[in-house]
Image: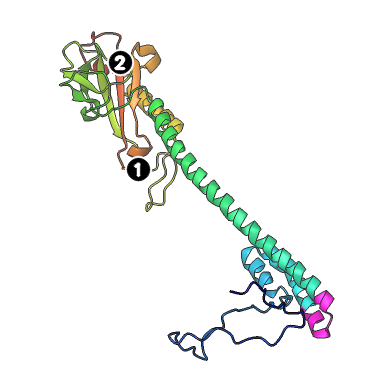
Amino acid sequence: MSDQLPPLTPPGPPGPPGPGPAPDPYAPARSPYDAPTSYQPLPRPPAEPSTGAGWSIVALLAWWPFGVAAYPHTQRATAALGAGDRQTFAAEGAKARRIGIAGLVFYIALTCLLTVGGLAGVVALGFWFEDVEIAADAATSTRYVDDDQPGSGPIDGTSVRELSEGSCYLTDGLTDVVRTVEVVRCAEPHGGELYRLTHVPSDAFGQTDGVTEPAFPGPAVMARYADETCRAAFESATGTTAEDSGLHFWHTAPDPWDWRALDRQLSCFAESDADDLTARVSER
């Protein structure tokens, strides 16, 4: 084995490139339609300015004052484009676009506001109907309640809605809200009587056309009408005023729901302080 080193190669310009790696015999053949291995996208040309005609139409459909304001800018942009004035064309088109966008935003905001206001109105209307029902109940001295709601009267008594004119009943144990009463003969000691049973006519609060049903007049008007009707009926039957009779008076009258269901019964009641009456009020 020799101890001498191999000769050094002097530096110089590189020689011709040597042969590359041998092709892979098992590699699939490339098609001329294959995509190139590397792709450099071409830069997109700048967008052409617009006359804003589309935004003018959008503004006109969304809220017409904005469309009217955008239209002159669209016209000036179109004229400038025809004259080759690119600067005026771009500026006027941009103004029409801004006005159109403002009109669309205004329309969306107004639609949202009206939607929220409409929903709030529906909720408020529901509360108003509930208040009307409560006010109608408060407008009468008593009210009829369902069987599953609290109210005074015997369990096996007669509903106040089922009493007929001239029915006498005991008042012992009754409160402001009466559900049922114990009916007795008017010749026996009793404290109350349904002395007048009538129905509120459709034209009681004004003329009607005879085709459509009149609207409910309101709880206060209905209560005043019922009170006047009952007092007039009492004075006609007894020949004395309600104030001079020494009796207490109350009535049941239609509420908005009864009125809509055409249940317009009006019942007039007279009661004493105790079960000490032994005849009808018209026979006293």
**At 39% from the left edge and 43% from the top edge, which residue is drawn?**
203
Label 1: element kind = helix
Region in magenta: 78-89
- Which sits in the foreground, 148 or 266? 148
Disc 2 + disc 1, Cβ < 8 Å: no
**At 67% from the left edge and 79% from the top edge, which residue is drawn?**
42
Label 2: element kind = loop
The spot of residue 61 in percent (x, y) is: 62, 67
Which residue is tagged 1?
Answer: 260
The spot of residue 58 in percent (x, y) is: 64, 68
- Which sits in the foreground, 77 or 255? 77
Q: Is residue 281 left or right of residue 232?
A: left
The spot of residue 205 in percent (x, y) is: 43, 39
Q: Is residue 266 above or below residue 157?
A: below
The spot of residue 77 in percent (x, y) is: 78, 76
- Which sits in the foreground, 179 or 111? 111
Q: Is residue 15 above or below residue 207?
A: below
**At 25% from the left edge and 19% from the top edge, which residue is drawn?**
193
